[in-house]
């Protein structure tokens, strides 16, 4: 989608700030802009079917009458096929949870900008929308909404499993690692993706119940791979909220030991986020895990504010470039710059660069030429259950 085809709505009650954003949009080449000072009016416009559909809503959070949170809820419930950029002067921790809430409502959140809005930030987020074609944009959202109770019942009924997505060495074409991604195998609704349950579990401090199920199953799978002759490292996602508890590292070490897997074969992926307030506790956990032999990876690089400065004090061994920057990046000048500089940054830090969301041969080739180390994405394979992954390996990477 080209920038001059994008229809943007700006919702901001402060007249000066709204004008500034509109002006920036014109500077970026956006030609179709609607602006309003209240969310109620915005919703009314969105509900009128004969108006040209709005592609992106840029929305302030703190507004009289209907605030941004309520607006996001209506957007989710009414399933408007629209991407959202949140702008706000609220503190970054609160913004991060609003971001998660938006995702839980099934909203495609392009990103959050802390005021004052800068042209470069706006440009980077809008270019994410440019990289989506109309079909992809229709597929976005439609995440089913579950209550925390339903999710916890599902966990206790052992309905959660890791799915496995291969990661390929771009130089050799070999699968050298695999990411374990949580799936809820719902008895009535089939396979449910993490956006429908992770945010609620994180917000209610229950995420560890899931983390340890996925960790133990992934570590057991790691042993199975080894027994079959595959030297694969397995990556598991760790929520940053879990890191505030200083007993976490020991509990992880014990859980992995119990399965007989070697911590050297396990990478813990941690999302870089502004929401991390308890840096000392997090660093204590990470140092302990590192000493035990676990590898650490910075996940979804580029999507949040740079707490990376704090985190690089710890020996990270890999930086994962978020799929929203990688998908279709070869044909988008801004995204190319983001991806290329992320690869450079990884190499300067002497860590591996991993691009996720690789969907085409062209993106694969461009990444290879840019010197990216590893690729993960549907071009290689979507995530699959353990048996399907074992079959995949037998077919594509037969053991020596
Ligand atoms: P993530 O860690 O960034 O994982 C990559 C996501 O991108 C996965 O979505 C994967 O299925 C998807 N993906 C990979 N390649 C492609 C591609 O080529 N195209 C497209 N369109 N998508 C691709 P998934 O599995 O829905 O996971 C979403 C997020 O949920 C993960 O993002 C991760 O942050 C979180 N998550 C998943 N499992 C766990 C878990 O066990 N614990 C925690 N705390 N978070 C988890
Ligand atoms: Ca991940």
Image: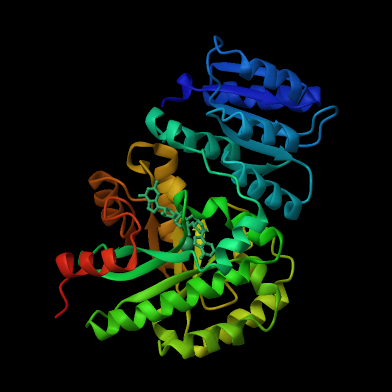
Query: Residue 200: horizontal and vertical position, in percent?
Result: 65, 55
Query: Residue 298: horizontal and vertical position, in percent?
Result: 51, 65
Q: What colour scheme governs how the chains and residues are painted in the rendered image of this protein?
A: rainbow
- Is 373 positioned to the left or the right of 262 in the image? left
Task: Name the residue rendered at 52%, 85% in the picture.
Answer: 255
Q: Nearer the viewer, residue 132 or 368?
A: 132
Q: Nearer the viewer, residue 156 or 243?
A: 156
The single residue placed furthest to the top in the displayed view is: 50
Q: Nearer the viewer, residue 164 or 282?
A: 164
The quadrant holding residue 347 is bottom left
- Is 279 positioned to the left or the right of 90 in the image? left
Task: Name the residue rendered at 41%, 58% in the picture.
Answer: 343
> Is residue 271 in sight in this rendering?
no
Task: Name the residue rendered at 44%, 39% in the picture.
Answer: 334
Picture mark count: 0
The single residue placed furthest to the right in the displayed view is: 64
Query: Residue 122: horizontal and vertical position, in percent?
Result: 59, 36
Q: Nearer the viewer, residue 215 or 283?
A: 215
Quarter of the image that includes the N terminus: top left
Q: Is residue 102 above or below residue 179?
A: above
Query: Residue 308: horizontal and vertical position, in percent?
Result: 59, 64
Quarter of the image that includes the C terminus: bottom left
> Is residue 241 in sight in this rendering?
yes
Task: Name the residue rendered at 61%, 35% in the picture.
Answer: 76
Q: Is residue 356 above or below residue 137?
A: below
């Amino acid at each position: 989608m080209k920038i001059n085809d994008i229809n943007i709505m700006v919702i901001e009650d402060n007249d000066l700030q709204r004008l500034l954003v509109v002006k920036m949009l014109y500077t970026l080449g956006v030609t179709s802009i609607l602006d309003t000072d209240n969310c109620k009016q915005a919703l009314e416009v969105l509900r009128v079917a004969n108006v040209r559909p709005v592609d992106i809503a840029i929305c302030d959070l703190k507004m009289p009458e209907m605030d941004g949170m309520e607006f996001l809820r209506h957007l989710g419930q009414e399933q408007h096929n629209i991407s959202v950029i949140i702008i706000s002067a609220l503190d970054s921790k609160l913004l991060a949870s609003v971001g998660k809430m938006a995702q839980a409502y099934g909203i495609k959140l392009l990103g959050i900008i802390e005021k004052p809005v800068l042209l470069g930030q706006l440009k980077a987020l809008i270019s994410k929308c440019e990289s989506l074609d109309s079909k992809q944009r229709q597929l976005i959202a439609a995440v089913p909404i579950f209550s925390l109770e339903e999710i916890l019942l599902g966990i206790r009924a052992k309905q959660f499993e890791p799915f496995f997505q291969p990661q390929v060495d771009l130089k050799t074409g070999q699968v050298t690692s695999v990411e374990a991604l949580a799936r809820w195998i719902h008895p009535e609704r089939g396979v449910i993706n993490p956006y429908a349950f992770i945010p609620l579990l994180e917000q209610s401090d229950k995420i560890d119940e899931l983390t340890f199920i996925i960790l133990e199953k992934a570590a057991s799978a790691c042993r199975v791979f080894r027994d079959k002759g595959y030297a694969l490292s397995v990556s598991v996602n760790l929520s940053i909220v879990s890191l505030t508890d200083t007993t976490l590292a020991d509990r992880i070490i014990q859980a992995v030991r119990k399965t007989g897997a070697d911590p050297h074969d396990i990478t813990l992926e941690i999302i870089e986020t502004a929401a991390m307030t308890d840096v000392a506790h997090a660093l204590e956990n990470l140092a302990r895990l590192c000493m035990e032999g676990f590898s650490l990876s910075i996940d979804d690089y580029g999507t949040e504010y740079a707490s990376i400065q704090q985190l690089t004090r710890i020996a990270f061994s890999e930086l994962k470039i978020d799929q929203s920057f990688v998908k279709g990046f070869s044909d988008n000048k801004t995204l190319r710059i983001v991806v290329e500089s992320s690869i450079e940054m990884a190499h300067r830090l002497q860590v591996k660069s991993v691009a996720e969301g690789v969907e085409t041969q062209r993106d694969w080739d461009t990444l290879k030429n840019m010197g990216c180390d590893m690729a993960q994405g549907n071009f290689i394979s979507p995530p699959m259950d353990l048996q399907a992954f074992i079959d995949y390996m037998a077919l594509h990477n037969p053991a020596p």
